[in-house]
Image (cartoon, grey):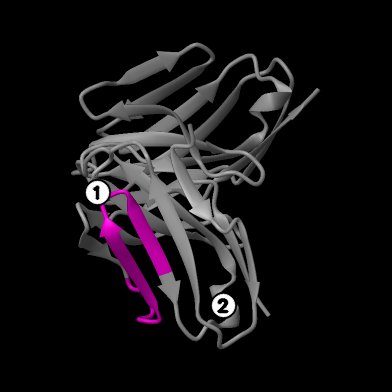
Amino acid sequence: DTAVSQTPKYLVTQMGNDKSIKCEQNLGHDTMYWYKQDSKKFLKIMFSYNNKELIINETVPNRFSPKSPDKAHLNLHINSLELGDSAVYFCASSPATRDTQYFGPGTRLTVL
Amino acid sequence: GENVEQHPSTLSVQEGDSAVIKCTYSDSASNYFPWYKQELGKGPQLIIDIRSNVGEKKDQRIAVTLNKTAKHFSLHITETQPEDSAVYFCAASIFGNQFYFGTGTSLTVIP
C-alpha cells in the first residue's frame, strides 16, 4: 500500500563517494520531484520530472543527476559527495503539475 | 520568484487551546496553497489546501483562510491534541508548476 517509497532510509558514506537514492510511486502520478531538507527543516525543490522529462532544475551542483527510467521512478545520483550534501532528501509525486504533492518518507544522507 | 514567509517558527499551546500559523507570499499569481504536517522521522503529509477562488476551508478541527489582497493565508487548529505536535509547512504554487515552501513551524501541544 506504500504510495511513495524511497530507498535507502538512511545512508552514511564518506566524502568523495558516489551514491544513489531510489524513489518509486505506485499512485499512477505523472510528475515526480526531489526535495532537500536541511538541518533547519527548510524544504527546497531540486528537480521535477513530468512523464520522464525534466521540467524543473533548480540551482543545484551538477554532481546531482536525476534519472527517470519510467514515470513511476525517479532516482537521484550524487557524485563526489561533500559534507554539505548531508541532509534529508524527499521524493514526492503529484497526479499532474497542477495538483498537490505526496511525499515519501525521506532518505537521511550523512556524509562523513 | 515567489517568496513565502511563515510565522512563528515555534509555537507551544496547552492541550485544548487553538493554534494559528501564518504565511505570506509575494507573487500575486500564486493560486494554490497547501499545508503540510511533518511528524518526526516522516515525510510531509498534506493536511488541507485552499485555492485562490476560495476564502476559507474547514476540515474538522483544521481550517485555512486566504486573503488574496493582503497575500497571506493562515492555518487554524482548534481543540489541539498532543498528536497535533509536529512541524507544519505552508506552501504557495502557481498552478502546481512550482511549489515554494515556508520555513516551517514547530508546534508543541502540552498535555
* Visible residue check, residue B70: no
Q: Residue at x 40, y 49 (%)?
A: A24
Numbered range of the magenta stretch: A59-76
Residue B30 picture quarter: top left
* Residue A111, x across and y down, in percent: 63, 76
Was residue A79 drawn as part of the magenta stretch in this picture?
Answer: no
Residue B3 picture quarter: bottom left
* Residue B66, x across and y down, in percent: 33, 28
Please name the amino acid that badge 2 sits on.
Answer: Gly
* Residue A43, x across and y down, in percent: 47, 55
* Visible residue check, residue A59: yes
Q: Secondary structure at mark 1?
A: loop
Q: Residues within 10 Å of mark 1 (few under 14, many from 20)?
A: some
B78 with respect to B64 (left or right): right
Q: Chain of mark 2?
A: A
B64 with respect to B99 (left or right): right
Above or below, B110 against A51 in this view is: above
Magenta span: predominant SS is strand
Furthest residue toward right: B111
Q: Nearer the viewer, residue B97 or A30?
A: A30
Q: For mark 2, what is the residue?
A: A84
